[in-house]
Image: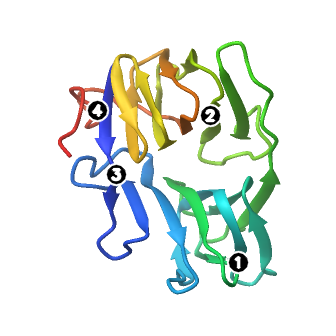
Amino acid sequence: MTVRIVPGEIAAKDTTARVVLPTVALPKFAPYERVAETIALPARRLPMHKHQASEVFTYVIEGSGTYEVAGSPIEPIGAGDARLLSAPSIASHAISPEKGHSIRYFAVVANLAANDAATVKVQSSRASESGPQADGTAVTRLVGPTGPLRSSAGLECDALRFVNDGTSFRRVGHGTIALCYALAGRAHIDNETIEGGEAAVIANAAGVAIQGEPGFRAMILRTPGTAGPAASPVLGARAPG
């Protein structure tokens, strides 16, 4: 098993985004193309932009605004809302803050087989958080077999929040690669410390133990993959930051 902690970097072109992939420390981690947390402000609206051969998952952490896909009606979104854009062919979308407000969201772009004849699809949900679990966490299932959204790229995603001190064992699975992005607080993942704005990239593991304290929040991602010492950058413990 390999676990590596990677610090987020403030994007050079967009100072409102904290990116953990691609960065100097983690330039590649297939099938993920980009993993980032963004705060969109009324004065710094993000323009409509294109995706192709990609699946884009967006989860609103705080605030409110609108979600728009070219050719479709604009939809209001707020904290707890999720969107999954499957774009085998070209699709454009944008997230904008509500007037006078900001919106903070987490987004993942994953590889998807290109197919210019395939239909672009958007799924939406407002999933509910579970009650406190015995391990001290509350979980929101977002994407995957137990969540409301189904990914064509095989992506699974949960939002994890520690309401009490505890240790939570999270499934990864051999043949699967995983990424844990810390939204807030501090925890230990198999003895490696992770804090808000950092990510743990995980490969070759049946699962990992997350020892957290109240207030620790994280996004847990899993996808099928073959990452390993020869195929991925997940080597050593902590990337320089």
- What whole-number distance in Å separates the C-alpha atoms at marks 4 and 3? 16 Å
Say if mark 4 contacts mark 3, CB within 8 Å: no
- What whole-number distance in Å separates the C-alpha atoms at marks 3 and 1? 27 Å
- Helix, strand or loop under label 3: loop
Work out whether residue 112 or residue 96 is closer to the camera in this orientation and state it.
96
N-term mark: 3 or 1: 3
Query: Which mark, residue 68?
Result: 1
Please, what is the three-letter code of the amino acid marked with disc 3?
Gly
Residue 116: percent from the left, percent from the top? 60, 71
Is residue 151 left or right of 43 when viewed as pictured?
A: right
Residue 122: percent from the left, percent from the top? 74, 63
N-term mark: 1 or 2: 1
120 in relation to 198, above or below: below
N-term mark: 2 or 4: 2
Residue 33: percent from the left, percent from the top? 42, 55
- Helix, strand or loop under label 1: strand
- Helix, strand or loop under label 2: strand
- What whole-number distance in Å separates the C-alpha atoms at marks 3 and 2? 19 Å
Please, what is the three-letter code of the amino acid marked with disc 4?
Val
- The quarter in which the N terminus is drawn is top left
**Pointer 4: residues within 10 angstroms few (<14), some, or many (20+)?**
many
Residue tagged 4: 234
189 in relation to 142, above or below: above
Image quadrant of residue 22? bottom left
Please, what is the three-letter code of the amino acid marked with disc 2?
Leu
- What whole-number distance in Å separates the C-alpha atoms at marks 2 and 4? 22 Å
Q: Residue at x 57, y 21 (%)?
A: 170
Of badges 1 and 2, nearer the viewer stands 2
**Pointer 1: residues within 10 angstroms few (<14), some, or many (20+)?**
some
Residue tagged 3: 8
Please, what is the three-letter code of the amino acid marked with disc 1?
Glu
**Pointer 3: residues within 10 angstroms few (<14), some, or many (20+)?**
many
